Image (cartoon, coloured by chain):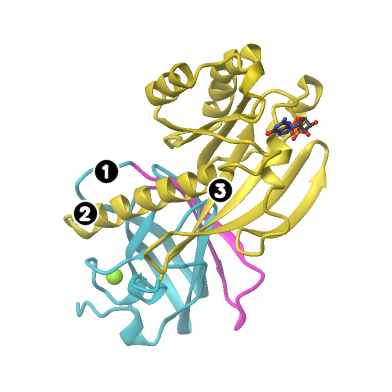
Amino acid sequence: MIDSSLSSLGAKVVVAASSDENHPPENIIDGNTSTFWTSTGMFPQEFIIRFAESTQISAVTVDSYNVKQLKIEKNTSPNASQFESVTEQELKRTEGHLQSNTILLNGSNATHLRFIITSGYDHFVSVHRVSVQNVQT
Amino acid sequence: MVKLRARCLLVGDAAVGKSALSHMFHSDGTLFQKNYSMTAGVELLMKCVQIPETSDSVELYIIDSAGKQTLVDACEKMWGEPSLLFLVFDLTSEPSFASCSHWMERVRAHCGDLQLPGVLVGNKSDLSARREVEASVAQHWAQSRGLDYHETSAKEMENCEAPLLGLARTFHALYQDHRDTIQNLGPG
Ligand SMILES: Nc1nc2c(ncn2[C@@H]2O[C@H](COP(=O)(O)OP(=O)(O)O)[C@@H](O)[C@H]2O)c(=O)[nH]1
Ligand SMILES: [Mg+2]
């Protein structure tokens, strides 16, 4: 399987409250875990990934640091609105290396995935990569 | 350029000067920006503090809780998960200093996994003849709890920016530590 970054497949990060211009939200989908988006204080934090076209997703892998409570929502609409809840998880704390969590989405169809970080293990959290495993067609 | 955001809880006994301190900058456009709301005993103020010698700034969302016991329970619901502690006592009132441990515990209970840096402020330094709390005692107490200590007079507008700048600098330093840490992380 070719490991393409989401951005090379035409995906975009459409919303992210981010305020460090050296670490923009695009770093989430560049396929590289050494670049990252970081929050700059307070919870909740959220970002939305928009796919170039409606995509059947079997699983999503999130590489992050200090994220505690993570909610994922999705929709199948062309707009970033009317999301339905997919899952809510408490991620394990890691030290010295990234959190890497694969979350099964059971082949759901989506045009947007919304990630809401409701709490962290520190005042600041970072997301280094989100990658998606598509259902083979 | 970085813009940080911190939720800052302003607590202490009634009448120590919390509201006087938080309103200090109403007329000063650089520090005071918006007065969001006044609800059941809670006032939310936003101040943007520039970190000297950088292009970075910290927006402090200051939650001023009424010190009256009857209102504190209502206020606690508005506290959320605080980032910073702004703890005030009255230099002319030993009991208001004695209450500080209680306030600190009360706020800590809302912090979950987060550490709670902040400042201890002895206010009403203009009333020097009535002083009941020695600077060295307050300083020592603050240090043992990881807080920076400042003395202010909201009345004489003395040293009132120092606590805010201290809070902003502390949060900014935490952010830099965080960024250094994640730049050196291994893969998951
Ligand atoms: N002399 C003096 N009086 C002050 C000072 N700061 C506040 N006060 C007075 O103390 C009283 C209580 O102040 P307030 O800000 O309402 O206290 P809060 O209940 O902690 O918000 C008011 O009468 C203020 O005018 C100060 O620095 N010096
Ligand atoms: Mg990246």
Query: Mark 3 vs mark 2: which is more N-terminal?
Result: 3
**Which chain has been coloured yellow in this picture?**
B
Q: Residue furthest front?
A: B129
Say which chain is cyan.
A
Q: Which amino acid type is shown beneath numbered disc 1?
A: Thr
Q: CA distance from mark 2 to mark 1?
A: 9 Å
Mark 3 or mark 2, whichever is nearer to me: 3
- Residue under circle 2? B188
Is the residue at mark 3 from the same chain as the one at mark 1?
no
Give the label, 3 or 1, closer to the camera.
Answer: 3
Q: Which residue is mark 1?
A: A94
Q: Quadrant of residue B188?
A: bottom left
User: Which mark, by number, is residue B161?
Assistant: 3
Q: Quadrant of residue B22?
A: top right
Q: CA distance from mark 3 to mark 2?
A: 43 Å
Mark 3 near mark 2, Cβ–Cβ under 8 Å? Answer: no
As rendered, which of B45 and B19 lies closer to the eye?
B19
